[in-house]
Amino acid sequence: MAKVNIMRLLPSVDELFKHEKLAALNESIPAVRIKNSVRDALTALREEYLARKDDPDFIPYDEDEIVEKVLSRILAEHETSLKKVINGTGIVIHTNLGRSLLPEVVRDALLDAAFSYNNLEYDLKSGQRGSRYTHLESTIKELTGAEDVLVVNNNAAAVMLALNTMVQGREAIISRGELVEIGGSFRVPEVLKMSGGFLREVGTTNKTHLYDYEEAICEETGILLKVHTSNYHIIGFTETVDGRDLAELGRKHDIPVVEDLGSGLFVDLSKYGLEYEPTVRDTLAKGVDVVTFSGDKLLGGPQAGIIVGRKKYIQAMKKNQLTRALRVDKMTISALEATLRLYLDEDRAMAAIPTMRMLTLTLEELAHRAEVLYRNLLRKVKTCHLDVVDCQSQVGGGSLPQERLPSRAVTIVPMNMSLNDFERRMRLGKYHVIGKIHKERYELDVRTFLEGDMEKIVDAVKLALKDNGRASAE
Ligand SMILES: *Cc1c(COP(=O)(O)O)cnc(C)c1O
């Protein structure tokens, strides 16, 4: 290249800003964002030019190339942070991918809640101030047989509120086998400490007997606490105390029993071939005084923490100042109400709630899906090896940790790039497909696909396999 000042070849911010291709973005992207991105892009180009100014092979970009670079930078910088992804992991309640998907009927409820005024805290009958907690009461009572109900932000908040209200300065007796940590940040002993209570551990990691609880009961005892060991399972020589026996012991000593169920279920899933897990109704029927559970795990609704049980304890929680800080908003109430109403008819719930539907898909349906995707890929993409294999999906969200659901996966092995490159391209590409590398293959479990995902996946694979020359050089 001749000895000209190559920096001179770069356009100015203003020149670029006025370029017709960029001006067209003005409709959808605020001008300050465009200007900032143009400035950033030019800085990057200037640095690149400077670094390569003595490189005889360096050819400065032409105007079109520069505009393309700036354009893609603007679009990338203006993307929303929260993005749709395609879940090819087969983990139905994937906490990192947003847990449960809401049923379609929730759409209208959410739109109404968002764009109209409503009676959130207004009693239409009396024309007086009302309570936001009344909206979900009757449906939850009907579904669980509970005396009273309170819904808060999530189950962690529900447990904290229950403990803060019922233990306060006294002890919660809990089995050593149930001192669990869930999702890295919810640790039962810490939550208890934060709620102003003290821990009284009884039994051992693998075995706790009723007499262990009984011997620990004293003046200082506030509650007997039972926590679902959601995300792990102790196998072998084990013994735990059932809620029924604990409830009886509690009644004998006039001490309330609280159970954190974790997931919370309204349907007995063993009818559908899954492991038996007690429903919320079954747990209350055992005599447990207060039960807490999540809204967005197996229940398949929005993020929420539901507390059900005896009126006197729930009333005390409603009066607790903490409740104001943990309260749910109108969007949650409307989404939860619409989801819960589906459970009044079990068949409808199983068909309409995505979490329930995905968990109970038959192997036949899954095999068909896998076959369709496999054939479409076979027709449309060349440079990879494809196959359909048996796999096992997980429930996720710390629910039914033992359960492995037989499923089918389509596997892809690219010919011209590494599996890691391919996985990264699928993840970062237009559709953000999340799959996993397993046994030296890229695997997509079809269980967690949504309507329309398969077409997008074919497109994503085509795009990911393109220009692999550059990918391997990156
Ligand atoms: C998941 C879980 C929680 C936390 O519930 P969030 O709704 O995520 O706050 C608490 N306890 C148990 C046993 C759980 O499984």
Image (cartoon, rainbow, N blue to C red):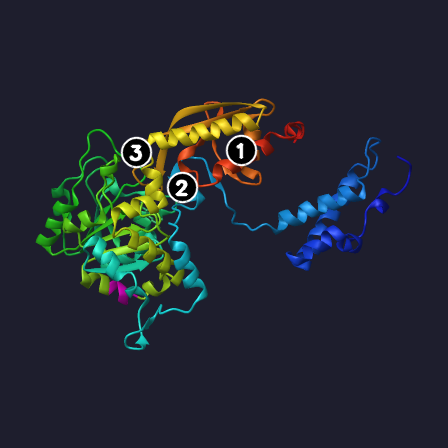
Q: Could you tell me which residue is drawn at 39 percent across and 50 percent down?
A: 104
- Which residue corresponds to mark 3? 403
For residue 149, what is the image quadrant? bottom left
Confirm or reject: label 2 Cβ below 8 Å from ligand 1. Answer: no
Marks 3 and 2, how far apart at CA: 15 Å
The reply to whether dot 3 and dot 1 touch (C-beta < 8 Å) is: no
Say which of marks 1 and 2 sits in front.
1
- Which residue corresponds to mark 1? 458
For residue 66, what is the image quadrant? top right
User: Looking at the image, is 200 positioned above or below residue 436?
Assistant: below
Amino acid type shown at disc 1: Val
- The boundaries of the magenta stretch are 316-320
Marks 1 and 2, how far apart at CA: 23 Å
- Which residue corresponds to mark 2? 94
Amino acid type shown at disc 3: Glu
The reply to whether dot 1 and dot 2 touch (C-beta < 8 Å) is: no
Marks 3 and 1, how far apart at CA: 30 Å
Q: Find residue 368 and report its horizontal and vertical position in percent.
A: 40, 30
Q: Find residue 46 and report its horizontal and vertical position in percent.
A: 78, 45
Can residue 54 be seen by looking at this rendering?
yes
Q: Could you tell me which residue is drawn at 38 percent across and 68 percent down?
A: 118
For the residue pair 220 and 291, the one nearer the viewer reads as 291
Amino acid type shown at disc 2: His
Which is more N-terminal, label 1 or label 3? 3
Which is more N-terminal, label 2 or label 3? 2
